[in-house]
Amino acid sequence: MTILNIFLNKNQRANRGHFANIVKIAKVDGKLTRREIVLLKKIKRDLGISDIIFRSIVRHPERYPINPPTNYEDRITRLHTLAKMLIVEKESYELSLKLLEKLAVGIGFPLKTHKEVVKLAVKLVMSHTDVSTFAAEIKKINIHKD
């Protein structure tokens, strides 16, 4: 844990860990493209992460703990949040979709259903569905026993 993480509240710590996970997935091919950086900066703003922390996380995402949701309800809520953050700009739609598919697996959705779950998540978010309806619809296509 870095000195920057000592005096954080639970939400701030979760946001930093969450952002670090997104950066790790974006850097899976070894580099970040301009489009990925623009998208990461948008996510940074949405999560309330400062420029200093942003640079620290982008340079060393491994220093931040992975904090995947521990139960199914939290996974669905996290997916809803991720979809809302990522699927907003037409020019980054394809990149966002690929990243969202990777993140869905990272937060615990099974490989056999993650693409279908993401496809539905995007559709629901684009139609401004509330989180409870979102959860009910995701559960219909992603039969899961937790």
Image (tube, rainbow, N blue to C red):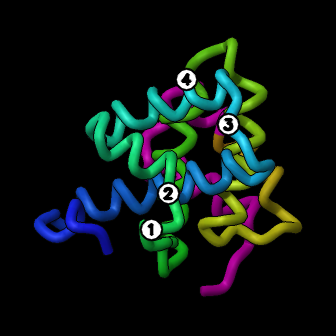
Q: Residue furthest bottom?
A: 146
Q: Which residue is mark 2?
A: 60
Query: Image quarter for residue 112?
Result: bottom right
Element marked by disc 2: loop
Reading the chain from its start, which is encountered first: label 4 or label 1? 4
Q: Amino acid at mark 3?
A: Leu
Q: Amino acid at mark 1?
A: Arg
Determine whether, in the image, residue 83 is placed left or right of residue 31.
Answer: left
Reading the chain from its start, which is encountered first: label 3 or label 4? 3
User: Which residue is painted at 74% across and 53% down in the image?
Assistant: 28
Label 1 crowd bin: few (<14), some (14–19), many (20+), radius 10 Å: few
Reading the chain from its start, which is encountered first: label 1 or label 3? 3
Reading the chain from its start, which is encountered first: label 3 or label 2? 3
Q: Which residue is mark 3?
A: 32
Q: Is residue 133 magenta?
A: yes
Element marked by disc 1: helix
Query: Image quarter for residue 145?
Result: bottom right
Front residue of 51 and 123 = 51
State the separation of the CA atoms marked 1 and 2.
6 Å
Secondary structure mostly taken by the magenta-highlighted segment of the chain:
helix
State the separation of the CA atoms marked 3 and 2.
13 Å
Q: Which residue is mark 1?
A: 63
Determine whether, in the image, residue 31 is placed left or right of residue 23.
Answer: right
Q: Which residue is mark 4?
A: 38
Residue 87 image point, x, y percent: 60, 29
Label 3 crowd bin: few (<14), some (14–19), many (20+), radius 10 Å: some
Element marked by disc 4: helix
Q: Which residues are magenta?
A: 122-146
